[in-house]
């Protein structure tokens, strides 16, 4: 299944405190020769960050922005960290990716547990894998595999209903 050296358009959904791991996962795949194009929302200019904190940007504006970013991607990768399951925007991104028929891949961060998996990801994931280059790459490429955070196989949490893009 491994198909290294190709361009992949991904949207990486994550809790903002896990932002460094976005770079880590893209670097991990770059080392394999992949050209990763990440459309996720990352560090904002200070003035835009301030506007968000002051609630001067409506949820509808944020959703419109995220819809475009998700639409551009072929796969949505959800980084599963300690607080991912508590983040409403991560849930919204997963639900939107499912509405758009995107492949959705969960990736456990080191130290992540099965309790950290958002319910929406359990409902819509095409794959959930541990932090391993081959596992991540194969899942992005279409392998429907479900693993524990330690990399052991486990059953899918639901009947799969999302597509492979």
Image (spheres, grey):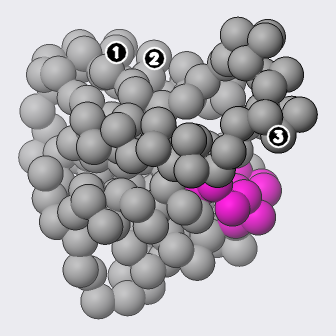
* Percent coordinates x, y for residue 138 in the rendering: 23, 46
Q: Residues within 10 Å of mark 3 (few under 14, many from 20)?
A: few
* Nearer-the-camera pick, 111 or 16: 16
* Percent coordinates x, y for residue 21 in the rendering: 62, 30
Do callouts 1 and 2 mark residues in contact (Cβ within 8 Å)? yes
Q: Assign the magenta stretch its main secondary structure.
A: helix
- Tell me which corner region of the image, top left, top right, bottom left or bottom right, holds residue 71: top left
Q: Is residue 118 left or right of residue 164?
A: right
Residue named by callout 1: 30
Report helix, strand or loop for mark 3. Answer: loop
Report helix, strand or loop for mark 2. Answer: helix
At horizontal 73% and vertical 18% (from top left) the residue drawn is: 48
User: Is residue 89 found inside the magenta-colored segment of the image?
Assistant: yes
* Percent coordinates x, y for residue 45 in the rendering: 70, 10
At horizontal 39% and vertical 25% (from top left) the residue drawn is: 38
Q: Distance between the Cα atoms at labels 1 and 2?
A: 5 Å
Q: Earlier in the sequence, mark 2 or mark 3?
A: 2
Report the mark closest to the observer, 2 or 3.
Answer: 3
Report helix, strand or loop for mark 1. Answer: helix
Q: Residue furthest toward the right?
A: 54
Residue named by callout 3: 55
Image: magenta residue range: 81-90
Q: Distance between the Cα atoms at labels 1 and 3?
A: 36 Å
Residue named by callout 2: 27
């Amino acid at each position: 299944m491994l198909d290294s050296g190709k361009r992949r358009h991904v949207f990486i959904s994550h809790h903002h405190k896990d932002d460094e791991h976005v770079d880590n996962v893209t670097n991990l795949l770059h080392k394999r020769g992949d050209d990763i194009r990440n459309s996720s929302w990352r560090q904002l200019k200070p003035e835009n960050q301030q506007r968000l904190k002051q609630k001067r940007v409506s949820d509808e504006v944020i959703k419109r922005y995220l819809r475009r970013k998700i639409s551009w991607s072929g796969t949505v990768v959800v980084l599963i960290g300690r607080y991912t399951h508590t983040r409403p925007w991560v849930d919204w991104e997963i639900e939107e990716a499912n509405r758009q028929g995107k492949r959705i891949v969960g990736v456990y961060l080191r130290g992540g547990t099965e309790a950290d998996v958002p319910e929406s990801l359990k409902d819509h994931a095409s794959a959930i894998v541990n932090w391993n280059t081959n596992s991540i790459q194969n899942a992005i490429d279409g392998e429907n595999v479900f693993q524990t955070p330690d990399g052991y196989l486990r059953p899918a949490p639901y009947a799969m209903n999302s597509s492979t893009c």
